[in-house]
Amino acid sequence: MQNKKKHPDIKEILLLEKVIRKKVSELAAVINRDYRGKKPILVSILKGSVVFLCDLIRQLEIPVVLDFMSVSSYAGDSESSGVVRLLMDMRESIVGRDVLIIEDIIDTGLTLSYLKRNLMTRKPSSLKICVLLDKKACRKIEIKVDYAGFVIPNKFCVGYGLDYNQFYRELPYIGVLKPEIYRTAHRKI
Ligand code: IMP
Ligand code: MG
């Protein structure tokens, strides 16, 4: 498969399409093994994790139920506000179910720790976390990540579902934006 040409706003490509594909297969293999005989509910956190979710589930050999939640911790900026808001709840009941949260990236950990606390009150049988990207050095709160694709440096990334001001999600690779984009992007398009 051919990579799309590098977007002019991208300074460097951090993870190529083929590198992501290999990692997603590896994660799926571990999840297939760990959940053998189970029917977990995968809770994908909108919108960033949908590309990852779609690639991941097509490598799964266990039956899964999909659900979605939407939270916001960034108010259209490149730094976390630290305030997490629930924008959309999931539909399914998770009482007695095995739940696996699918998230694109963990940074401070505030979003996932909020979600974990929230979902634990609903009495799932188990609750685990799967992220594609882990900015390990940026954690403000301790939280266990059960499945992590790549540990990445503290650089603002876009592509493969990740956005800046809602753009760049369609890029098939994960890249770092040019700094001048932050400086000018606050002008509303
Ligand atoms: P946390 O609450 O600080 O862990 O942030 C998690 C959320 O912040 C993710 O779900 C993303 O939506 C967003 N985020 C953190 N780092 C990045 C990044 O480098 N690019 C795009 N979004 C990011
Ligand atoms: Mg997100």
Image: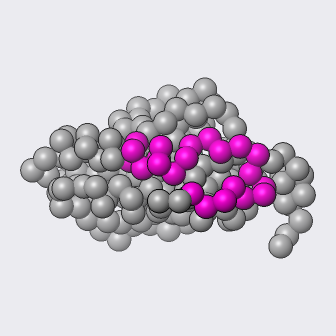
Q: Does residue 15 sit above or below 55 in this rendering? A: above
For residue 72, what is the image quadrant?
A: bottom right
Could you say which is closer to the camera, residue 160 or residue 129? 160
Query: Between 28 and 102, which is closer to the camera in this rendering?
Result: 28
Furthest-front residue in this view: 2
Q: Is residue 51 left or right of residue 38?
A: right
Residue 117 in the image, given as x and y percentages of width and height: 42, 45
Q: x, y (%) of residue 59? A: 28, 55
Quick one: which residue is furthest to the left in this view? 37
Residue 169 at x, y percent in the picture: 61, 62
**Nearest the camera: 107 or 13?**
13
- In the image, residue 108 sits, relative to residue 36, either above or below, namely above
From what the image shows, is residue 31 above or below residue 5?
Answer: above
Is 180 on the left or on the right of 162, as rendered?
right
Q: Is residue 40 left or right of residue 53?
A: left
Side of 104 where 180 appears, left or right: right
Q: Say if 44 sits above or below 33 in the image.
A: below
Let me know if residue 155 appears in the view: yes
- What residue do we see at 83% from left, 73% from top? 189
- Residue at left 35%, top 55%? 56
Locate residue 144, reporting x and y percent.
41, 32
Residue 141 visible in the displayed image: no
**Who's the residue at 60% across and 49% down the image?**
174
Write down the region rendered in magenta.
Answer: 3-24
Is residue 62 on the magenta stretch?
A: no
Q: Residue sitting at 62 percent across and 41 percent down?
A: 14
